[in-house]
Every structure is written in structure tokens, then in C-alpha cells.
Image (cartoon, rainbow, N blue to C red):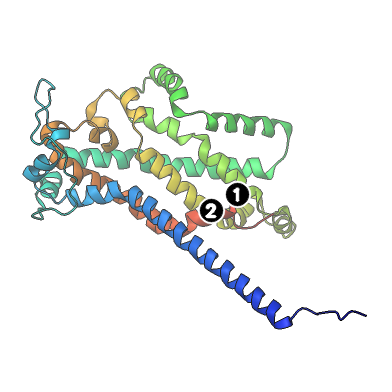
Amino acid sequence: MPHLRLPDPDKRFKTAIRKAHRKKRISKLGIVIGTLIAAVFAFLFLLPTVLTITNSFMSSSEISANYGAVFQTTESGGKVFIAKTVNLKFIPDIVSFSQYYTVLFKSPEYLLKFWNSMIYVVPILGFQLMIAMLASYGFARYQGKVREIIFFIYIVLMLMPYQVTLVPNYLVSSKLGILDTRWAIWLPGFFSPFAVYLLTKFIRRIPTEVMEAASIDGAGEWQIFSRICMPLCKSGLISIAILVFIDYWNMVEQPLILLSNDELHPLSVFLSKINAGEISLAFAVAVIYLVPPLLIFLYGEEYLVEGISYQGGLKG
């Protein structure tokens, strides 16, 4: 009989180790490349914000020298090129707080527009969440054909961009006599279907057994709503609040169409109307404008991620 040659176990073991090391090196290389690509995109994403913050500490003359080719215009609308090229500068030659001093103390119109933004956003946020909590509890708690039809209408309204409903909102506001008043902005915001839809999805993730057990123990509807549903939807409520705040903080179309009085315009509209003579203040105003949404995001970042990832406190 011919002699059978068995494979060397050590050789097979060494080959397996080499393959494992090769796969590990490829995996590490993929992680490094992915990290570098993500870092490049993160840098490009943060570049405008960093540029705005650093340029807010430049003097007016330095901003005109660096960005005159973009911003400097004459009274007739023609361009006056102080420099033929735009110089994107991140570090100011001399750190100056003159722009912030002008915005905060010398030009009250900027702060007036800032508080206009707060006056619009805070009531809309509060009432929209309150209405959403009550409506979403009803949609999630009770079943029925009428409920399904109404909820479907909510979904259709939420899918429509605001530009589609802008003309109907204008006609309704005109009929109600609230054009050029804050109510023209408040009322559509109070009853926006966005928060109702999302919060309904959160409450539906709560097992019905939890509510049935509370009902058997003698809890009423208000107790189930306030002590079970809303605490379990805390992450959802905070994430919705952040999204609603940012959405209405950055609104432009609604004030432009529904408010003809410039004194009622929020800062988001006013920023786009800063003329060439005040462009040096635009950076400081933009930084002040960034502060509220940034603080809210930093405070509720964990809740926002949790709310988007899990869509509720418990999984059904």
C-alpha cells in the first residue's frame, strides 16, 4: 500500500494564524480609512460655523479687507471690489469685541429681533407639545375606523411641505383678521401635526399590558396618561422639543409672507436683510443666533439619540 502523507498540523495552524492577522490588518486599515473620511466630512461640515465664530472677533476693516469682493456694494447695487480675491481667514489679526458691543448695546434692533424669535418659538413649542401629548394619547390608546382616518389625515398633512400650505394659511389668516400679528405665526404652529405623529409612535411602543394592569389597579385615564405614558415618553418628548425648536427657530417663509411689518420679523429673517454697511455685524449676530439651539442640543443630545434610536421608553 502506498504511504499516505498526512497534512502537517503546525503548518495548517500557522496558515490560519497568517490569515487571521491579514484579516485583522485589513480591518484596521478599513477603520483608519473610514475615520479619515469621516474626519474630512466633519471638518467640511463644521467649517462654516468655525469661520463664523472666529470672524465675529474681527474688526470691521479687517472683514471688509478679507471679504470685500463678496459683500461690499454701492447704494445703486453695484459691486465695489476692495480685493479681487476672497481671503478665508480663521484667525483675526487683532481680537476685537466691538461687534458684540455694537450688537448688544448700541443697536437694540438686533436684540429686538432675537426676542421676537423667542416670542414666536417658545409658545409654539409649549402649546404644540401640550396638544401633541393629549392627541397622541387618544390616537394610541383607542382603536377605531374614525381614529384611523383622522390619523391618516395627520400623516398626509405632515408629509406636505410648509410651502404647499402657505397660501391656505395666508387666506385663513386674512379671513380671521390676524395677518401682520403674531397669531398668524402662532396658530399654525400650535396645531402642527409633526409632534402628534411622532409622539403617537412613541406611545404605541408602550405595551398595552402596562396600561391594562394600571387600569385593573384602579388608575383612571388621567393617571395612566400622566404617570405611565408621559414618563415613559420622556426621551421622545425631549427629542421632539429639540426638533420643533430648531424648525421654528429657523423659519423664514412664514414671517415673510404673513408679516409685512418688519418690527415683527424674527432674527432669522433679519439676518438675510443685513445690508452691506452692516455686514461686519452679521458674524456677531449669527453667533448670538446660534447660542439657543446649540445649548438645547447639548442639553438634550442623549435624549435625542435615544428617542430617535428606540422610538420610546419600552419596546412592544
CA distance for labels 1 and 2:
8 Å
- Secondary structure of residue under mark 1: helix
- Secondary structure of residue under mark 2: helix
Compared with 81, 95 (above or below) is: below
Compared with 14, 240 (above or below) is: above
Q: Nearer the viewer, mark 1 or mark 2?
A: 2
Name the image quarter holding the N terminus.
bottom right
In-front residue for pair 76/304: 76
The percent position of residue 256, horizontal first and vertical second, equals 31, 26
Residue beneath the point at 25% across and 32% down? 272
Residue beneath the point at 12% across and 23% down? 78
Name the image quarter holding the C terminus.
bottom right
Q: Residue 202 carries which label?
A: 1
In-front residue for pair 306/40: 40
Q: To which quarter of the image does residue 38 belong?
A: bottom left
Compared with 213, 79 (above or below) is: above
For disc 1, the neighbor class at 10 Å (few under 14, some 14 to 19, many from 20) is many
Q: What residue type is labelled 1?
A: Phe
Are the residues tagged 1 and 2 within 8 Å (C-beta)? yes
Residue beneath the point at 58% across and 67% down? 23
User: Circle 2 sits on which residue?
Assistant: 307
Instruction: State left or right for residue 231 relative to residue 264.
Output: right
Q: What residue type is labelled 2?
A: Gly
The percent position of residue 94, horizontal first and vertical second, equals 8, 55
Q: Does label 1 or label 2 sit earlier along the sequence? A: 1
